[in-house]
Amino acid sequence: MNYEEALLKQIDIYIDEILPAYHMTTVEGMKMAKKLRLFKKIDFLKYAGEFETHKENALKLESMELRIPEELVELRLLEKDFRKCLLSFVILCDANILFYELNEKKQYKNKDFTIKEYSEAVNDMQEALRDAVLESQILEKSYKEYLEEHAPQGEPAEADDAEKDEAEEIEE
């Protein structure tokens, strides 16, 4: 596998596998965090564990150093954007882990943390989310541009799902 194939495969794994799994965990976890449970406790550590798994999966991709030659400038720039995106995702996962660990303590009225710590955890999670979304947008843009510029001769770059759906609607 060459440098380009390896990097594009890593990005695809991140976009197609890690991000959707993260999204599902977030939606389910936040739904549970908003509920007030008086008698039945929620296993918030389950969500913290799932975020830990998402983080580990991203770190596995980050650790796959490709050593792209300097003359492949555009590919190196894409890799740089990808690494920055992974880093912001790892920080986001860490913020989520802390948030759900504090929720676990909160429901048992554990006095090991203060409301200030909880508020800071929420703010940190929101800030990490903003950063991760920004880095994801940058990666998405550079990834799309790279694919458009380096599509094989005679073949257009692969359309994203929205473009495919739009094309199918037109055909019908």
Image (cartoon, rainbow, N blue to C red):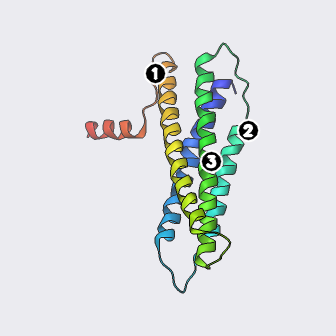
What secondary structure is found at the residue carrying circle 2? helix
Tell which tag, 1 or 3, sits nearer the viewer.
3
Q: Are marks 2 and 3 in contact (CB under 8 Å)?
A: no
Q: In which quarter of the image is residue 47?
A: bottom right
**Residue 155 shows which numbered tag?**
1
In the structure shown, which secondary structural element does the residue marked by tag 1 occupy?
loop
Relative to 156, 44 lies left or right:
right
Which residue does the image show at 64% across and 30% down from the upper left? Answer: 7
Vertical side of 106 occupied by 137: above or below: above
Of the pair 34 and 8, the residue shown nearer to us: 34
- In this rendering, does residue 43 appear at all? no
Which residue is under mark 3?
91
Q: Along the polypeptide, which appears first: circle 1 or circle 3? A: 3
Q: Position of residue 117 (x, y in %)?
A: 60, 63
Residue 92 locus on image (x, y percent):
59, 50
Q: What's the residue at 50%, 70% (across, down)?
A: 32
User: Where residue 105 appears, x then y in whole percent?
Assistant: 63, 73
Q: What residue type is labelled 1?
A: Glu
Contact between labelled residues 2 and 1, with CB atoms less than 8 Å apart? no
- Density class for disc 2 (Cα within 10 Å; few <14, some 14-19, many ≥20) is few
For marks 1 and 2, give the CA distance. 32 Å
Quarter in which the N terminus is drawn: top right
Tag 2 residue: 63
Q: Give the left or right position of residue 141, taking residue 162 as reference.
A: right
Cα gap from disc 1 to disc 3, whole angstroms:
38 Å
**Residue flagged by tag 2: what amino acid is it?**
Ser
Front-most of residues 13 and 165: 13
